[in-house]
């Protein structure tokens, strides 16, 4: 167990934090939704029923889409762009880049295959992140539309189609308010890593490194 924990400690702790906060979101969201139900003169719903409502689906995937969008674009932007002095950037000059370090072990089969398989594998991280963004975006749209439809039905108003709702300002307000915060967070990390340090973190330069040093 000690060896397993050492090899997987970071992902296990992050998974536990995700599970705890996701459970908190479900329970708190359930209470909020039922409070709104009672205020509208409707009966409260069970937790399994709540998890199928637009209120939960929209709130969940609206956040997930912004995270995957931020990570996908960040992976791609760091391929082409530089920021002098940032630990998050590749060195300014290609000749200053350290040689690619490949640890001992078997080469992944996709890398050995060559051709288009290798080409796809060489970009598979950004492809996966942007695919997850696309899935989350669709689920956010469906959940937000479902929530909007529930509100309109309570008011006795007609419900627009999903394609029509995609042009609604409410949906884009939900998206942009999350997207901008994600890009702001990445910008903050890129800039702060020029001047600030965190000992032993791979996201930080060495404590004694000059501010002008670019990359870790």
Image (tube, helix red, strand yellow):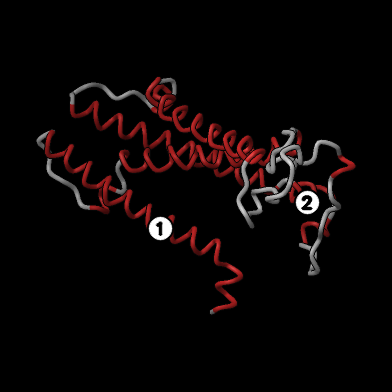
Please identify, in this view, whether the residue under mark 2 or under mark 1 is nearer the observer.
Answer: 1
Extreme left residue here? 41
In the figure, is residue 187 to the left or right of 53? right
> x and y percent of residue 92 in the render?
81, 36
Q: Residue at x 41, y 24 (%)?
A: 173
- Circle 1 packing at 10 Å, graded few (<14), some (14-19), many (20+), is few
Tally the numbered discs.
2
The spot of residue 4 in percent (x, y) is 57, 75
Residue pictured at 40% horizontal, 20% vertical: 169
Q: Which residue is mark 2?
A: 117
Other residues around mark 2 within 10 Å, as few (<14) / some (14–19) / many (≥20): few
User: Which residue, as the protein is rendered here, is positioned at the far front?
Assistant: 208
Asked if residue 94 is positioned above or below residue 169 in the image, the reply reads below
Residues at marks 2 and 1 touching, judged by CB atoms closer than 8 Å: no
Circle 1 residue: 19
Query: Residue 213, how many percent across, how many down?
Result: 76, 41
Quadrant position of residue 102 = bottom right
Which element type, helix, strand or loop, lies under badge 1? helix
- Of all residues, the one furthest to the bottom in this rendering is 1
Q: Secondary structure at mark 2?
A: helix
Q: Residue at x 55, y 78 (%)?
A: 2
Left or right of 42 in this view: 101? right
In front here: 183 or 83? 83
Q: Residue at x 37, y 37 (%)?
A: 143
């Amino acid at each position: 167990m000690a060896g397993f924990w050492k090899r997987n400690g970071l992902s296990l702790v992050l998974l536990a934090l995700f599970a705890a906060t996701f459970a908190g979101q479900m329970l708190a969201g359930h209470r909020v939704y039922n409070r709104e139900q009672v205020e509208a003169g409707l009966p409260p719903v069970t937790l399994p029923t709540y998890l199928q409502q637009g209120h939960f689906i929209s709130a969940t995937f609206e956040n997930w889409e912004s995270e995957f969008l931020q990570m996908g674009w960040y992976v791609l932007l760091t391929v082409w762009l530089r920021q002098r002095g940032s630990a998050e950037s590749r060195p300014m000059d290609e000749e200053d880049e350290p040689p690619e370090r490949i640890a001992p072990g078997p080469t992944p089969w996709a890398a050995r295959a060559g051709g288009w398989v290798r080409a796809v594998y060489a970009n598979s991280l950004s492809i996966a992140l942007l695919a997850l963004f696309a899935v989350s975006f669709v689920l956010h749209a469906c959940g937000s539309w479902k929530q909007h439809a529930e509100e309109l039905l309570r008011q006795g108003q007609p419900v627009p189609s999903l394609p029509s709702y995609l042009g609604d300002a409410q949906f884009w307000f939900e998206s942009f308010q999350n997207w901008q915060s994600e890009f702001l967070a990445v910008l903050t990390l890129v800039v702060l890593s020029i001047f600030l340090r965190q000992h032993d973190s791979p996201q930080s330069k060495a404590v004694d490194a000059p501010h002008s040093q670019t990359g870790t």
